[in-house]
Amino acid sequence: MRYFKEYCEVNLEPGTAPFTWVFRSEEKIRIRFGVAVDKHPDCGQIIYELNDGQGYCDSHQITAETESVVENGFKMFSVILPPISSGGGCRYWLGYLDKFGNEHTSQHSRFLLVCDEAPRSMAEIPSVFLGFVDNQPLYGPKPVVAMTPSPTDWNARLFYSIIIDRFARGSDRHRTGLGAVKYDPSCPYASHGGTIRGVIEKINYLKSLGIRAIILSPVYVNAADGYHGYHPINLLMVEPRLGTLACLRELVAKAHEADIAVILDVVNNHIADSIQWEEYGGPPGGEFKYVHGDDTAVMPFPVEVRNTSLFHGPEYTDMVNQRLFGFLEDWRTETSYVRELLIQHLKYWIAQTDIDGFRYDSARHVGLDFWEPCVEEISRFAKYLGKHQFLQIAEHAGSSHEELIAYNSAKFSNLLDYPTYYIVKHSLADANWLGGFAEYFCGILTPSQPYHAGWRNNIMFLDNQDTTRIFHEFLSRIPNQDEARVRLHFAIACLVLGPQIPSIYQGTEQEFSGALGMHQREDTGDWIGHDCYVREDMFDNPACVWHFGPINQKSFEPYSRNHSTFVLIHQLAEIRFKSRLIQSGKRTLLCSRKDGLWCVLIHGTTDEPPILVAMNLGSKAVSDHALTLPKWYGAFDGVDMLMTTAGGAFYFVEGGLRIRLSPFTFVIGKLWKDSQKSAIVEAKIPDIIKHK
């Protein structure tokens, strides 16, 4: 039993809610509870809200069956809930009618889910001998959907990072009531209703932006505070408020049809706050909060994880062996049992969905004794499925290259390049200087130490869900929005056409300008960091107002395609995708002058015409009447302008190359040796692209 106020519940009886909170549609959901006899209960009641996941909702009250038993001063009742189809759920409240005819209902509710797709145990996932890969035996689940070969052109693609809950509300909005996470569009820390279906319905939007790879936030069932997906309580089930496993498969298939790869964010470091440790009042070795009596907690899935010895306690040791942020339960990934369990769960998601890669959250908080066998095993499993370039991206938020390179032995295919991001961000100390972006573009920021897969295979970004947005960085220094936008476009051009794989965060193309902040707790007075303003909704949600004002302040209509920043990203993405030199060519700095003029030649060893980039990093217009190109590359007769961010041109004249650039302008063109090409082509941003 577990006891709270006037009620008690049967808490450790298999097949009985709420100990079992994920059922299958053919199972009867039985709730057994008690009411203190001193409350004079006459009959028990259950009030429930049922959601079948398809739009049908029902709220009703059921009279419970009275059991002829009193246990520990509680009169016992039981009830069977109405059947629920797979993909649905139920939230219920305990209650009773006393002998005086008064109705009583508990303030606390519990949620139950029905899912025929999700395994409850790792033992339900058949692991069979698949053959030999890399001269080693391979075991794992057989794929349940057709597998798509990995892209071979990752370096050509523009990546796009998505928080599903905040990206798009789909036609399945009725799912908002499912799961533990509260739906409250006005609260910045609650669910706002984005779904996997919403992402599917925006595939054409992403394609028109030029996106060819998306990174999806975790799809696990999450605890009440996990709208973002990073507080998992079930490693094998899709969060029902986001959709179903079938819906996730559909998303991957639709994305592949649009030549968009799908990378799934996964969490191998921790699960949600689930254990009452001895230090906080639990027994020696800790006890799951559900068993301990926390009426808001659930037991985690799969069932194999229900052992507190699989997690590190609250004692501080180091960055690897401690609870993340002091409250998320940290896996003992140094043990073979935990390693095998987590690796098998990763194989499950690949075999079930046909995804093209993983983003490993909190990679630096997990030791190499886990990553080395994990990355190797997932690589072999992906090869077996025909995914020979399956991405394994590590989110290691270290501030120096030395910290990230220390993980070389794990052999990640890519890392999020936080050190380079920090260097570029710190260069903004001078509002008129864009040198950090130019240096990045030129390859000057290449570290001297080698990465396992090469620095150019790292993922570069200007902002993400954990950082202040890049447009805010400019607006905070240059309040004039038009002038700040010119600098934003310069930065985006340097990113998308830069030497590494570029990634943008949802909303960058819509000029979102939120910033990380601090707020003071009213109860303790402590100052606490918050991320409300960098987790904005892409969709219209004027209800979301926090302590310091409205969050969703948009420059354009949601998902607008008819403005210069969207069009610019589309242009840049196409240039990168079509040019091998942008992806892998050598970058030679021809000049960097005090007036702000920088010129860069991107070239290779093939016959592909070289690319010339001219940049004005200063606040005044610049020109050069006779820039001479290196003789070692031969003579050129013309140039085809590809794109400019803010007005400018370069063209051939007798004696060299003439350049004219507006302040903070980035111009790119392709040089030609063919004298038949036009000798003078002015560079202008084309008319706004018309989209259907």
Image: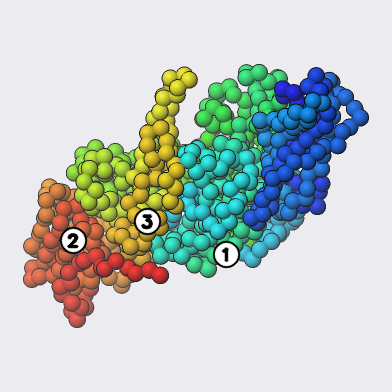
Q: On the rendered image, what quadrant is the C terminus found in?
A: bottom left
Residue 466 left/right relative to 29: left
| Pair 3/2: label in front | 3
Classify residue 188 as left or right of residue 112. Answer: left
Q: Is residue 266 above or below residue 38?
A: below
Q: Is residue 194 visible?
A: yes
**Mark 1, secondary structure of its residue:** helix
Q: Residue furthest front?
A: 100
Q: Which one is nearer the viewer's eye here, 14 or 552?
A: 552
Q: Measuring 39% from the left and 41% from the top, which residue is drawn there?
A: 551
Q: Mark 3 highlights which residue? A: 557
**Mark 1 or 3: the one toward you:** 3
Q: Earlier in the sequence, mark 3 or mark 2?
A: 3
Taking 529 as reference, is 624 above or below it?
Answer: below
SS type, badge 2: loop
Badge 1 or badge 3: first in the primary sequence: 1
| Spot occupied by residue 680 in the image (x, y as percentages of width and height) | 15, 73
Disc on res. 253: 1
Type of amino acid under label 1: Ala
Residue 485 placed where, x, y %?
A: 25, 51
Disc 3 crowd, CA 10 A, few/some/many (<14, 14-19, 20+): few
x 81%, y 23%: residue: 40
Q: Amino acid at mark 2?
A: Gly
Count of labels in the image: 3
Q: In whole angstroms, how far apart are the C-alphas of marks 1 and 2?
A: 40 Å
Kindly identify the amino acid type of the residue bearing the numbered disc 3. Glu
Q: Nearer the viewer, residue 102 or 56?
A: 102
The percent position of residue 116, horizontal first and vertical second, equals 73, 53
Residue placed most toward the observer, 576 or 629: 576
According to the picture, the residue beneath numbered tag 2 turns out to be 647
